Image (cartoon, rainbow, N blue to C red):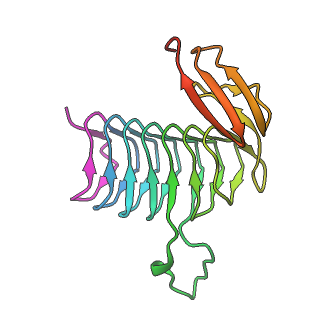
Amino acid sequence: MAYKAHPTAIVDEGARIGDGTRIWHWVHVSAQASIGEGCSLGQNVYVGNDVTIGHNVKIQNNVSVYDAVTLEDDVFCGPSMVFTNVYNPRSAVTRKDEYRRTLVKRGATLGANCTIVCGNTVGEYAFVGAGAVINKNVPAYALMVGVPARQIGWMSEFGEQLPLPLQGAAEAICAHTGARYVLDGNAVTKLDAKKTP
């Protein structure tokens, strides 16, 4: 099984694209990009050369994944969300040797129209709300909203808010999966899953 690309898409020779990936209208994938299996690249997506995209990543319409960005497995990029790779851009100053790397870890959701400022890591299964601006590292499972983004809660892997305080010691069960989440200080971990979604 190979990937599928719409006739209007441009996939440069040398790009590595996994089986079952779907590439829609007016997408451009650069020659050195690496894209995993089972991904979906919506209309008008751009993927740069120094980009690694894992398996089952969904990139919605009008998203540019610029050089120095890595998306791990199961990441969701909402419509028109933005990545950057230069912290202090100037049209008259070339800074291609100053790109700051961005890492979005497994299962994270980046909501529509949010912006991920370069040089930051978005933790596993974190959830960035629509329109938020991420200018610092995001903990695993954190729910982030606003400009600049602030943490307002914790999210399960299923994508539901957990009834946990921002800090302290507490536990919560995901009603959909039975998975148990434990808050210790200012970090959440998933301990087990009693049933699957």
Q: Toward the viewer: 108 or 132?
A: 108
State the extent of the magenta-drawn residues as a range.
1-20
Q: How many labels does the image show?
A: 0
* Left or right of residue 70: residue 154: right
Quarter of the N terminus within the rendering:
top left
Which picture quadrant has residue 162?
Answer: top right
Q: Identify the residue shown where x is 38% and y is 44%.
A: 54
* Left or right of residue 109: residue 41: left
> Where does residue 17 sit, x and y in percent of width and height?
27, 46
* Left or right of residue 87: residue 194: left
Q: Work out whether 69 lies above or below 86.
A: above
Q: Work out whether 27 lies above or below 167.
A: below
Does the image show residue 38?
Answer: yes
Q: Toward the viewer: 33 or 194?
A: 194
132 drawn magenta? no
> Where does residue 45 sit, x and y in percent of width and height?
46, 51
